[in-house]
Image (tube, grey):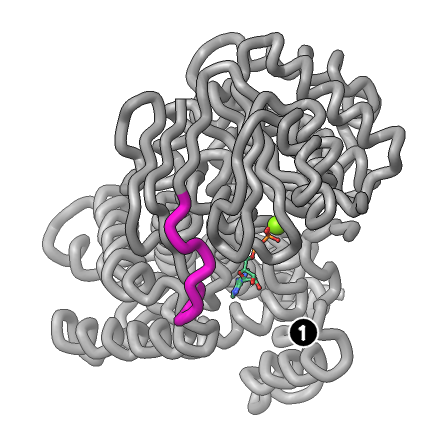
Amino acid sequence: MLEVRNLRSVYGRIEVLKGIDLDVQTGEIVALVGSNGAGKTTLLRALSGVQPITSGEIRFKGQRIDRLPPHKRVELGMTQSPEGRQVFGPLTVEDNLRLGAYRRRDKAIDQDRDRIFTMFPVLAEKRHLLAGGLSGGQQQMLAIGRALMGRPKLLLLDEPSLGLSPLLVDQILDAIVSLKKDGITVLLVEQNASAALAIADRGYVLETGKVAHCGAGSALLADPKIKAAYLGIA
Amino acid sequence: MAEFLQFLISGLTVGAVYALVALGFTLIYNASGVVNFAQGEFVMLGGMVTVFVSAAGVPLPLAAVIAIGVAVAIGLLLHRFAIEPARGASAVTLIIITIGASILLRGLAAIVFDKQFHKLPAFTGDTPVDVLGAAVQPQSFWVLGGTAVVVLALYVFLEHTITGKAVLATAANRLAARLVGINTTTIMALAFGGSAAIGAIAGILVTPITLTSYDVGTLLALKGFAAAMLGGMGNPLGAVVGGLLLGLLEAFGAGYISSTYKDAFAFVVILIVLFAAPQGLFGRRVVERV
Ligand SMILES: Nc1ncnc2c1ncn2[C@@H]1O[C@H](COP(=O)(O)OP(=O)(O)O)[C@@H](O)[C@H]1O
Ligand SMILES: [Mg+2]
């Protein structure tokens, strides 16, 4: 589904991605973990085309996409729920979801919106309210719902559990697992590494712009070195 | 009473023109964060192109359509060759670019057309209509009606079409807009083209009343900017209300105080808004909870 080779990216003169190699197979949940500032967000932005890269290759469904503008990547079936939610505050919940389907021309948009409402019933209640007035958890659901409205083959999620109560975190993680059953491939970025690795098929650990470890989610969870460094468990 | 009504209607008429200029500012500001000081030149182009094309024997309605087309083309060129290459530059840089474009367009107009004042015939004659004792030029109704149509069309576009919502989404959060697949470059081009059309329409409607020349844009841009600031930069409703208020302020100020200082009111408004209420009357259309 996704192949990343030797991807590099800079902010000014500081190299933030120092040659990333990463693969996501169709149908997988892949977790991308690592401490704050490791470059996870930058990597997802580069994948979506909103962060310039200096070298490297990105292939999606076998096709080179690293020179395509962001909207073409959305059209091909890669959407993202960005870090910090980034909902369209002055627009309604319904409009936010409709804009998630901006590049679609098919007739099933309303039907998909109703499925999002089934998945997150609180959004249905607030469908006519402005997104900027929702709570953090509700905005997070909206951001995920908006990304799903693009009918992705590959969904990129950047810290979907950030700042949420444990109950809401569980609800979001359940939702991600159910996406897998619907045939959506997920690349999940999380600081909450143990939760992410627990639901992931495979995981990558990013360390200052490089892949430090990768392997099955359960294997990474069990690795004592990783436990000590990233999971806060001695 | 008749005198009051006279001031009221003439205030609303100029106010409508300021409102259209302010709407042009708002549209571009929302889509791109740029304050486009060449906005007044679109108004000038609307009037001047209509004058010269109709003088060449083309019927007035067709000349007006051509003028709108010319303004839109120039708006798109301005975006493509002056704004787009400077993507990512600071707000000050972009403002200076638009000021430069405004000077360039004025210079070109002086060469291509001339430096004289020009008039268009009123669309439906010059016989004043009596409104409760006030003598009103029929062209005033064209200005007010035309403005109402433009405002309504823009409202329907922004609130009820998916492309319009994409403009609002781009204004609210450019990064998120790109991530859902909105081509924000196209949205910006659309805003420049749309603003140019709105400006040109204002120029065509008002030229039979105020005359036009190559340099009418400068003062109009400042008035429109004052109106947009008064209403709250970035807020379309604020732009319209700000424009009408500024027009009324000028008309009543000129009528009851002194017409010598008519143009000063706009600057006083800018200063008061900047000092007392930088958000304007309505503020930006932002509801954000962090
Ligand atoms: N807009 C920016 N300008 C400059 N440096 C940035 C910017 N965004 C992030 N960085 C830096 O890039 C590095 C990686 O950041 P990021 O990708 O956000 O990490 P993560 O998502 O893993 O926390 C950090 O050192 C951060 O300080
Ligand atoms: Mg991050």
Q: Which residue is drawn at 53% across and 73% down?
A: B223
Is B121 situated above or below A29?
below
| Beta carbon at label 1 within 8 Å of ligand 1 | no
Residue B45 x %, y %:
28, 62
Residue B243 shows up from this direction = yes
Give the answer, above or below, for where A61 lies relative to A91: above
Give the quarter of the image for residue A109: top right
For the point 50% across and 42% down, which residue is it?
A44
> For the residue labelled by badge 1, is the local secondary structure a helix, a strand or a loop?
helix
Q: Give the amino acid type for the residue marked by disc 1 in the picture.
A: Leu
Q: Is residue A19 magenta?
A: yes
Q: Nearer the viewer, residue A124 or B116?
A: A124
Left or right: B194, with B57 as reference point: right
Q: Quadrant of the N terminus of chain B?
A: bottom right
Residue B213 image position (x, y, % from top left): 29, 74
Question: Residue B279: percent from the left, percent from the top?
Answer: 71, 68
The residue that appears at 37% across and 69% down in the rendered structure is B38
- The residue nearer to you, when weighing B175 against B169, is B175
Residue B36 visible in the snapshot: no
The residue singled out by tag 1 in the image is B249
How packed mark 1 is, by other alpha carbons closer than 10 Å (few <14, some 14-19, many 20 or more), is many
B95 to B182, vertically: above or below:
below
Task: Please report, as a chain letter, where disc 1 is located.
Answer: B
Q: In this view, does B273 lie to the left or right of A181?
A: right
Q: Residue A130 appears at what percent x and percent y?
A: 75, 38
Position of A61 with respect to A33 (left or right) is: left
Q: Is residue A106 above or below residue A74?
A: above
In the image, the segment drawn in magenta is A11-20
Query: Can you tell me which quadrant of the image ligand 1 is in?
Result: bottom right
In this view, which residue lies farthest toward the front?
A224
How many numbered marks have been drawn onto this rendered protein structure? Answer: 1
